[in-house]
Amino acid sequence: MTAEELYEKAKTHLEAEELEPAEEALSQAIELEPEWAEPWHTLGDLYLKQENYEEAMEAYEQAAALDEENAEYWNALGRVYGITRQVEEAKDAYQRAIKLDREAPAHWNGLGVLYFEGLGKPESGMQCFLRAEHLGKGRYAGNLFSAFAQLPPHPFFSYRIIRDYMPPEDHEKWKGYLRSTFETALPLAAYLNWLDKKQEQAGLPEARWHKLLGLANYYMGDPSVALEHLEKSQEQELDLMISYYQILACWDFLEPDAPYLEPALERAATFLPPEQSGWKFWQKKEEAPPLSAKDVEQCYYAGLIFVEHDEIEKALQCFERIERDFLPAAYQAFWCSEELVLAKKKKEKGEYLLAQEARRQQFAGGLAPIQADPQGAGFPDGLLRAVRYAELEEAIERLHMYAEFEGSPQEYEVQPPREQPAFYQLWQYLPEDWERMTALLVEGMEKEAFRGQVERYVKGEMSGSEEEE
């Protein structure tokens, strides 16, 4: 028999769970054609099924050495390295598989498991699971459920995963997790749904509505859905704020950012002030022309895009251009000055910020929960205020440290951002408004079992402790 015939015979034995004759046929095929990678890989699978991990590892290593461009072989090698606690070797193998085939969810899932169980990096594991879910459409949702117990809330993402993938028989097992997800996700989900259904997108242009949905999903932990809405918004109206969040969403679930980053950097560069090459002190320095109110915000996001691209000097130029007209830019300029170790600039900008906040109290005191109006009035402003605060969190923390340790004539403290309520805690409702909005949300739910769980929660019938999970 030829090697090919022996290999087909081995596969027939494997399908019938006849492992010994399958192993014999594979060994004979390899003896005839030792440079053929596929029988080596199949032999590794057989040994793995038998829990003969050393033999599986040797077979997989042979397969990968013979066909270095086959992502499946590297994925299999990563799996057996992980089982045998060779975590660095496993990480390298999974990353090589991903480099060869970024669209295979199994590779991302395997790397995610390794980050959780072998490398002690659950946030990196969650990123991989986000990617596996996006590509595999729920095939690896079980690992996501296990991951949730170890991570901070991801409200919209958790809500969607439970709704779309959790089997009804698991609801009782996970009732504590369901309850915590509903507590964090339902207030904003119900409100967004109410606006969408009852007010035809609250009277907002479609581009702006998708922008708001994108921002809400991003800050509620579902970057893949956020990116879908941001793309729809950007198709209708070019906006550097959207470009900035497209980049962040890509990084959060490991989507290649080049399609968004390169055009964003090109547009951001148009907000840099004129170059001053050749300028001498006796010559008049060329000044940047004034910007419209809309372009002031675009200049701010141009600076943030440069920050994410690690071009802090360019970012500072954008922020300094508008810092007297737009307080968030003054915060970012203060942050940049510290990053670039510009002590004099940092002091000047810190004093300016403290003086402004003493007068206006725009960000220094944090955000109080917003009483959401079910008629939609003021909702976009409330959402955007919360987004803006989140963007400034690191700069506010540094201003807090500056005010506390470097002395200030101001008679107040800058609230540390860690004392700020989380994004999903910023919306509150009157009881009658909550009842009306959740009723509409439940009405549109297709899955009966999930709808029943939401109804139980809304009625206060969902009990049990988190320890059950």
Image (cartoon, helix red, strand yellow):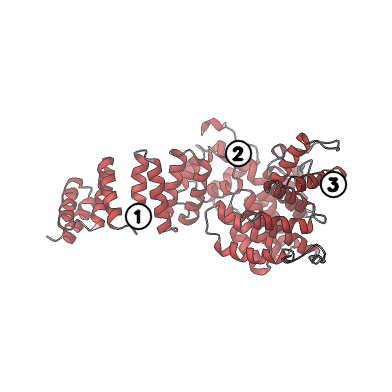
**Earlier sequence position, callout 2 versus callout 1:** 1
When the figure is inspected, residue 466 is found, relative to residue 12, above or below; the finding is above
Secondary structure under tag 3 reads: helix
**Earlier sequence position, callout 1 versus callout 3:** 1
Q: Marks 2 and 3, Cα distance to the nearest angstrom?
A: 39 Å
Q: Are marks 2 and 1 in contact (CB under 8 Å)?
A: no
Q: Marks 2 and 1, Cα distance to the nearest angstrom?
A: 38 Å
Secondary structure under tag 2 reads: helix
Mark 2 highlights which residue?
180
The x, y position of residue 444, in whole percent, is 62, 55
Crowding at dot 1, Cα within 10 Å, few <14 / some 14-19 / many 20+, comes out as many
Mark 3 highlights which residue?
356
Most distant residue in the bottom direction: 236
Q: Is residue 189 visible?
A: yes
At label 3, the amino acid type is Gln
Quarter of the N terminus within the rendering = bottom left
At label 1, the amino acid type is Glu
Q: Are marks 2 and 3 in contact (CB under 8 Å)?
A: no
At label 2, the amino acid type is Ser
Residue drawn at point x = 65 percent, y = 65 percent:
234
Which quarter of the figure has residue 248?
bottom right
Mark 1 highlights which residue?
72
Which quarter of the figure has residue 199?
bottom right
Name the one closer to the observer, 437 or 35: 35
Residue drawn at point x = 27 percent, y = 45 percent:
56
Crowding at dot 2, Cα within 10 Å, few <14 / some 14-19 / many 20+, comes out as some
The x, y position of residue 32, in whole percent, is 15, 57
The x, y position of residue 426, in whole percent, is 72, 44
